[in-house]
Amino acid sequence: MQRARRRGAWLFLAPMLLVLAGIAGWPLGRTIFFSLTDARLDLLGDYGFIGLENYLWLARDPEWWAAVRNTLVFASISVSLETLLGIVIALVLNARMRGRGLLRAAMLIPWAIPTVVSAQMWGWMLHDQYGVINEMFLAVGLIAEPRAWTADYGTALAAIIAVDVWKTTPFMALLVLAALQLLPEELYEAAEIDGLGPVGRFFRITLPLIWPALMVAIIFRTLDALRVFDLMYVLTGNSRATASMSVYARQQLVDFQDVGYGSAAATGLFLVIAIVTALFLTFGRLRLGAEPGR
């Protein structure tokens, strides 16, 4: 009976797996194939097999490693801030108060705005001559003169991280809030009777119970942050100070028309994401199809 159920499950899953293989597997396979060639966009039909030469050049390219560093710094800082702020906002919105539904709807506005639109909006807000951010900082004395936040090498990446935190924190807050809504009130009533304070209730009850959902949210958000493209490209273009791995791969493929080398960079991006995901699943003790800690 169990074997028949497994065969039936695979039979029902087969169409979906075939679609996924065609949508995701085929483009990935073609990208890996072209990364082993000297193909160019202007001469796509005329290319030769060169093995791992593109990867050897990639390993020696300082601009690629600068893009890797920018991406990892961006992902680690932005996801950390979004997680902390998301937890705080979710705890506030989970409390009983007037206007809670309106606050929840308003919280989603930054997340609902398309990334390109929000990036362009913040680009004007951070402008050195017309930006409202400079006006506010000048008014309170935080800066002595207007600054080009996205053009300055020292502040460009920090500005992009701030914009991403503004936009994506509602996503984390929404997922954490959904997990909080499922927690039984009886646990908190018993903890209050036992004299456990708010901080103790959070670390001993709330955090352990929402940990699986929180890890899923962090993994999804980290994967999204590692492949960031539109936010950096709209705000700073191909600037080396902020270029992500996706921006670098796009520049090699489109601007320089080097399909082979650009495909190698895209494959490198895929490998970095796969490694980070494996580390999260291992150290976060989250196993697909099983409960945490077992």
Image: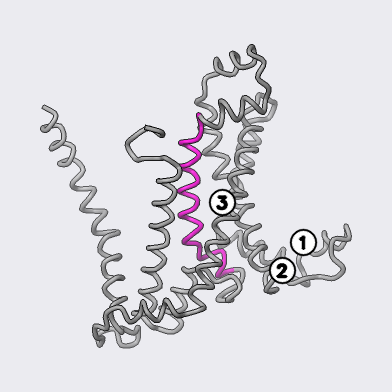
Q: Are marks 2 and 1 in contact (CB under 8 Å)?
A: yes
What residue is disc 1 on? 133
Res. 73 image quadrant:
bottom right
* Mark carried by residue 149: 2
| Mark 1 residue type | Ile
Q: Is residue 220 magenta?
A: yes
For the C terminus, the quadrant is: top left
In the image, which is nearer the foreground, mark 2 or mark 1?
Answer: 2
Q: Residue at x 44, y 45 (%)?
A: 283
Secondary element under disc 2, as helix, strand or loop, is loop
Read off the magenta span. Answer: 209-234
* Mark carried by residue 15: none
| Mark 2 residue type | Trp
Secondary element under disc 1, as helix, strand or loop, is helix
Q: Residues within 10 Å of mark 3 (few under 14, many from 20)?
A: many
What residue is disc 3 on? 79
Distance Cα–Cα, label 3 vs label 2:
21 Å
Distance Cα–Cα, label 2 vs label 1:
9 Å
Q: Earlier in the sequence, mark 2 or mark 1?
A: 1
Q: Residue at x 39, y 70 (%)?
A: 266
Q: Is residue 263 magenta?
A: no
In the image, which is nearer the foreground, mark 1 or mark 3?
Answer: 3
- Residue 10, given in percent of the width and then of the height, sits at 17, 41
Q: Earlier in the sequence, mark 1 or mark 3?
A: 3
In the image, which is nearer the foreground, mark 3 or mark 2?
Answer: 3
Q: Residue at x 15, y 32 (%)?
A: 5
Q: Earlier in the sequence, mark 3 or mark 2?
A: 3
| Mark 3 residue type | Val
